[in-house]
């Protein structure tokens, strides 16, 4: 894996956690690391810098992780609504994790963070990117993780044809096109 090619934005309000994550990223080979203390600073950074992956904390003062993801995914002036996002969470309620998932997070990483967990999430984003879909109330990566051929029950969405796959330019392409 060529982690040295990634441009990562780390959004974390806790300085000690930022230092720890930066050291972990450097240890696995990431060389281009940008920092932000909250979602507002992260959006400003993304407007001026090309970012490949965002690592963001769920609970932050100011603009928190869920609000940041909602703005990045849905705002008309979003700098990159297709950017892969890993949500970092320590002691959050199930409700907050569901909110983050429904905002359009690609992956979750639980605290305490390990290098193995970080590598695994980044590898999932790069090697197994999920297509983005748009429905009336959701825009983000397809939340269905796998298609089980043994499953015979009703689909979780009313119709599969409701799924609209989009490329980076927002064009309907019928298949995923985003690759890191």
Image (cartoon, rainbow, N blue to C red):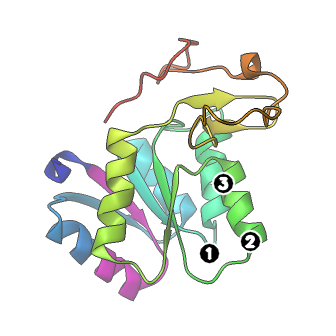
Residue 149 as seen in the image, left or right of residue 10: right
* Residue 69 forms part of the magenta stretch: no
Cα separation between marks 2 and 3: 11 Å
- Is disc 2 surrounded by few (<14), some (14 to 19) or many (20+) residues within 10 Å? few
- Is disc 3 surrounded by few (<14), some (14 to 19) or many (20+) residues within 10 Å? some
Whether residues under marks 1 and 3 lie with C-beta atoms below 8 angstroms apart, the answer is: no
Which residue is denoted by mark 3 in the rendering? 101
Q: Earlier in the sequence, mark 2 or mark 3?
A: 2
Q: Is residue 91 above or below residue 79?
A: below
Residue 124: percent from the left, percent from the top? Answer: 38, 49
Secondary structure of the residue carrying tag 1 is loop
- The residue sitting at 49% across, 78% down in the picture is 13
Q: Nearer the viewer, residue 137 or 107?
A: 107
Q: Which mark is residue 59?
A: 1
Q: Earlier in the sequence, mark 1 or mark 3?
A: 1
What residue occupies the far bottom of the structure in this picture? 16
Residue 77: percent from the left, percent from the top? Answer: 59, 35
Q: Which mark is residue 74?
A: none
Cα separation between marks 1 and 3: 14 Å
Q: Which mark is residue 94?
A: 2
Q: Nearer the viewer, residue 43 or 131?
A: 131
- The residue sitting at 39% across, 57% down in the picture is 121
Residue 132: percent from the left, percent from the top? Answer: 57, 31
Secondary structure of the residue carrying tag 3 is helix
Bounds of the magenta span?
Answer: 7-21
Secondary structure of the residue carrying tag 2 is helix
């Amino acid at each position: 894996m060529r982690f040295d090619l990634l441009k990562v934005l780390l959004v974390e309000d806790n300085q000690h956690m930022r230092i720890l994550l930066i050291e972990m990223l450097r240890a696995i080979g990431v060389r281009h690391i940008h920092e932000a203390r909250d979602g507002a600073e992260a959006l400003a950074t993304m407007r001026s810098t090309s970012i490949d992956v965002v690592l963001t904390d769920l609970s932050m003062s100011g603009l928190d992780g869920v609000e940041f993801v909602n703005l990045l995914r849905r705002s008309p002036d979003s700098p990159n609504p297709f950017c892969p996002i890993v949500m970092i969470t320590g002691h959050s309620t199930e409700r907050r994790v569901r909110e983050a998932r429904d905002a359009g997070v690609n992956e979750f990483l639980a605290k305490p963070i390990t290098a193995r967990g970080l590598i695994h999430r980044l590898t999932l984003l790069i090697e197994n990117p999920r297509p983005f879909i748009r429905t009336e109330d959701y825009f983000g990566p397809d939340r269905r993780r796998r298609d089980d051929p043994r499953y015979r029950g009703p689909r979780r969405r009313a119709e599969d044809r409701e799924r609209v796959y989009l490329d980076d330019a927002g064009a309907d392409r019928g298949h995923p096109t985003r690759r890191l």
